Image (spheres, rainbow, N blue to C red):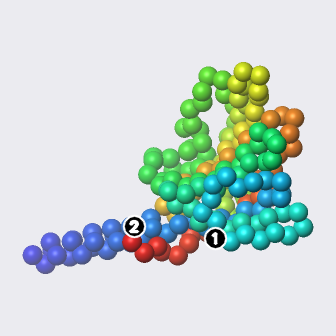
């Protein structure tokens, strides 16, 4: 009986720690030029300064942060999802991505440090009818989450550089159930 009780308590503690970790959102600090409009966000704060706006957004598997550049096809989005796959690293996660027939890789997956986190980056080109877009996808692991960001623009547009947009990624406080 003591062995069973010890095992039960051990499993309960492990489960509660894992559940507690899952309930912590990811907090991101994002700075965009003022000609970008927020489409969707769980923004906690917003501060404008010298033609740029800094947002602090809380992300979990129910929220995302999405912005569009005015009068262009440019899009910036960042979201998180539970890290329940079998990829052991962000680069391995990126390499598992399957592309549509009209999307071709530009470069092999590479890694770079952004806001203190190791991101794996893939770059692709997509052709749809008369439009061509360049897409950069960024993936990092943070606690129990996969942090995924995307920057899309056409070759003729100037686009944001993700390493200049994202300044901080952190786990937020544990949320109440």
Q: Residue at x 76, y 36 (%)?
A: 134
Q: Which mark is residue 44?
A: 1
Q: Which mark is residue 69?
A: none
Query: The C terminus is located in which quarter?
Result: bottom left
Q: Residue at x 55, y 44 (%)?
A: 93
Q: Which residue is mark 2?
A: 18
Q: Are marks 2 and 1 in contact (CB under 8 Å)?
A: no
The image quarter containing residue 155 is top right
* 173 up-or-down from 77: above or below: below
Task: Report helix, strand or loop for mark 1.
Answer: strand
Q: Which residue occupies the foreground of this view, 50 or 103? A: 50
Task: Report helix, strand or loop for mark 2.
Answer: helix
The image quarter containing residue 71 is top right
x, y percent for residue 169: 65, 65
x, y percent for residue 53: 79, 64
The image quarter containing residue 151 is top right
The crowding category of the residue bearing disc 2, from other C-alpha atoms within 10 Å (few below 14, some 14 to 19, many at least 20), is few
State left or right for residue 171 relative to residue 154. Answer: left
- Spatial CA distance of label 2 from label 1 is 25 Å
Q: Which residue occupies the foreground of this view, 35 or 164? A: 35
Say how many tags the image has: 2
Q: Earlier in the sequence, mark 2 or mark 1?
A: 2
State left or right for residue 92 relative to residue 149. Answer: left
């Amino acid at each position: 009986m003591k062995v069973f009780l010890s095992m039960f308590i051990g499993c309960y503690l492990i489960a509660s720690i894992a559940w507690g970790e899952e309930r912590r959102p990811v907090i991101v600090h994002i700075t965009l030029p003022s000609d970008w409009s927020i489409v969707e966000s769980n923004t906690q704060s917003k501060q404008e300064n010298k033609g740029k706006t800094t947002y602090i957004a809380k992300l979990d598997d129910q929220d995302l942060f999405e912005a569009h550049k005015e009068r262009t096809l440019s899009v910036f989005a960042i979201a998180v999802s539970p890290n329940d796959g079998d990829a052991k690293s962000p680069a391995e996660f990126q390499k598992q991505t399957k592309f549509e027939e009209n999307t071709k890789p530009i470069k092999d997956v590479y890694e770079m440090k952004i806001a203190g986190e190791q991101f794996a980056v893939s770059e692709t080109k997509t052709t749809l009818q008369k439009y061509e877009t360049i897409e950069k996808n960024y993936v990092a692991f943070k606690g129990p989450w996969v942090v995924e960001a995307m920057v899309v623009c056409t070759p003729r547009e100037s686009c944001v550089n993700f390493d200049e947009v994202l300044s901080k990624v952190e786990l937020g406080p544990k949320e109440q159930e």
